[in-house]
């Protein structure tokens, strides 16, 4: 089965002690993609043609900016801008009537930012909306990430050790818990789905309560009466709670 290629990273992610192994898988994919983007790949014609067209999302521009290869990033942005300037001029010149009628292009961009269906049919904001919402790195991650989710269910059905690994884990972040429940209904048959939910839902609820208690102890430690008590597991409870609730990984030294 094709999923077999992906089993090692999935099993490895579940072997780590974490609030969400799926977030870890996602983060590794994201780190690899940033390295890939700022490695020699951006000089390859076929990749640059794609990044010129698609560009990157705000989050991934920021991630790439945090890395060392500023020249590589500048080269990608330069040819992407050339493409934007060429295409935008073309769209604007072929929609001159619209251009005269439009009071505020900015307000149209703002309203269309959250509107992925481009309902307003305005070709200028439609084009800008596409540039704003598309990302070469997100697309690259998404492809492998979906395979990982397929592999999760492949392992769930075929590997008892993996079921034990998940059962001994700390559950998932809210978003990935929801994703797994959603995907389980199509990946598993009725019996398998019932078995899956009977195991995973109690683990999730138990671990959400556990983290609530850990953040509670973190707060109590600010009370002078508990000042000398041990931290237990609560020292990084804020970071782990944020990961659990919002899938956002914050480094311990940042807090
Ligand atoms: Zn997650
Ligand atoms: Zn992105």
Image (tube, grey):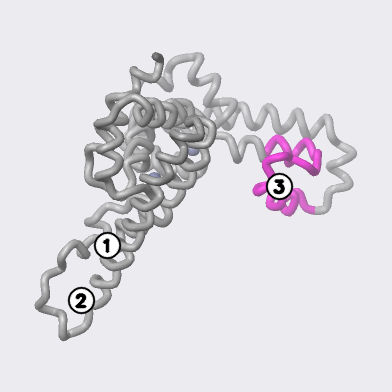
> Is residue 122 visible from the viewing direction of this image?
yes
Q: Which mark is residue 237?
A: 1
Which SS class for mark 1?
Answer: helix
- Along the line of sight, the residue nearer the viewer: 19 or 144: 19
Up/down of 208 relative to 187, above or below? below
Q: Which segment is the magenta one?
A: 104-128
Q: Which mark is residue 112?
A: 3
- Along the line of sight, the residue nearer the viewer: 224 or 177: 177
Mark 2 vs 3, N-terminal side:
3
Q: Nearer the viewer, mark 1 or mark 3?
A: 1
**Disc 1 to disc 3, C-alpha distance:** 38 Å
Q: Are marks 2 and 1 in contact (CB under 8 Å)?
A: no
Residue 204 pos. (x, y %): 37, 52
Residue 70 pos. (x, y %): 37, 35
Residue 13 within the segment the image draws in magenta = no
Q: Which residue is mark 2?
A: 221
Q: Main secondary structure of the magenta part?
A: helix
Residue 105 pos. (x, y %): 75, 48
**Disc 2 to disc 3, C-alpha distance:** 46 Å
Which SS class for mark 3?
Answer: helix
Residue in view at x 71 percent, y 52 percent: 111
Which SS class for mark 2?
Answer: loop
The single residue placed furthest to the front in the displayed view is 191
Label 3 crowding class (10 Å Cα cut-off): few <14, some 14-19, many 20+? many
Mark 1 vs 3, N-terminal side:
3
């Amino acid at each position: 089965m094709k999923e077999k290629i992906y089993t090692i990273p999935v099993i490895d992610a579940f072997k780590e002690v974490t609030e969400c192994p799926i977030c870890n898988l996602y983060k590794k994919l994201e780190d690899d993609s940033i390295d890939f983007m700022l490695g020699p790949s951006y000089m390859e014609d076929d990749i640059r043609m794609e990044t010129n067209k698609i560009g990157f999302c705000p989050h991934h521009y920021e991630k790439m900016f945090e890395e060392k290869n500023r020249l590589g990033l500048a080269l990608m942005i330069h040819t992407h801008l050339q493409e934007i300037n060429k295409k935008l001029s073309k769209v604007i010149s072929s929609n001159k009537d619209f251009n005269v009628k439009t009071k505020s292009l900015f307000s149209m961009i703002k309203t269309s930012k959250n509107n992925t269906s481009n309902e307003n049919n305005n070709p200028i904001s439609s084009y800008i909306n596409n540039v704003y919402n598309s990302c070469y790195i997100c697309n690259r991650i998404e492809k492998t990430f979906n395979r990982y989710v397929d592999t999760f269910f492949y392992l769930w059905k075929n590997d008892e050790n993996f079921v034990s690994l998940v059962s001994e884990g700390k559950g998932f972040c809210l978003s990935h818990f929801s994703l797994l429940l959603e995907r389980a209904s199509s990946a598993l048959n009725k019996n398998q789905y019932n078995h899956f939910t009977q195991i995973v839902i109690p683990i999730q609820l138990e671990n959400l309560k556990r983290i609530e208690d850990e953040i509670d102890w973190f707060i109590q430690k600010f009370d002078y009466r508990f000042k000398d008590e041990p931290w237990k597991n609560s020292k990084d409870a804020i970071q782990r709670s944020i990961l659990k609730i919002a899938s956002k990984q914050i480094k311990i030294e940042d807090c």
